[in-house]
Amino acid sequence: MADNILETMQRLLQDVIAPDVREIKVRVGSLEKSIDERFNGVDQRFDSLQQQNEAQFKAIMAAIAESKAQSENTALREISYLRERVAVLEAQRH
């Protein structure tokens, strides 16, 4: 009788539970593949955004450097002009 119960349990495992387990394994594998594909897509989008941000940052830094150079150039011209005026005024005083 115990053998009969064991055989029944074994048959139940082979006929009912084992196919369900195999199906679950296939579904999990499919989900893993789908998740991997989505994460790869997200990674590519982040890489693209990072490259765009780096390019924009470099452009902003270049614009700041250009503006600073222009500002310094303007200041130097004004200082030069004021030096000339002071020199003229000093020459007139003497």
Image (cartoon, helix red, strand yellow):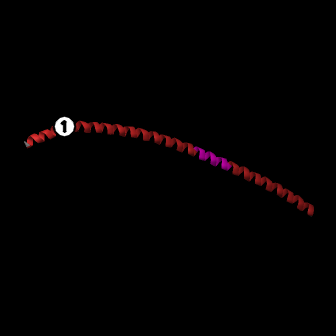
Left or right relative to 30: residue 77: right
Q: What is the x, y in percent for residue 62? A: 64, 47
- Identify the magenta region: 55-65
Which element carries disc 1, helix, strand or loop? Answer: helix
Left or right relative to 31: residue 84: right
Q: How many labels were placed on the picture?
A: 1
Q: Pick whichever, 37 or 16, lies toward us.
A: 16
Q: What is the x, y in percent for residue 41? A: 46, 39
Q: Quadrant of residue 14?
A: top left
Q: What is the x, y in percent for residue 61? A: 63, 49
Residue pictured at 46% horizontal, 41% vertical = 42
For the N terminus, the image quarter is top left
Q: Pick whichever, 70 or 60, lies toward us.
A: 60
Q: Quadrant of residue 56?
A: top right
Residue pictured at 30% horizontal, 36% vertical = 26
Q: Quadrant of residue 34?
A: top left
Q: Pick whichever, 91 or 62, lies toward us.
A: 62
Q: Does the magenta segment cover residue 1?
A: no
Q: Which residue is mark 1?
A: 14
Left or right relative to 72: residue 25: left
Magenta region, mostly helix, strand or loop? helix
Residue pictured at 43% horizontal, 41% vertical = 39
Direction left: furthest residue: 1
How many other residues sit within 10 Å of disc 1, few (<14), some (14-19) or many (≥20)?
Answer: few
Q: What is the x, y in percent for residue 84? A: 85, 56
Three-letter amino acid code at the position of disc 1: Gln
Task: Say above or below: 34 vs 58.
Answer: above
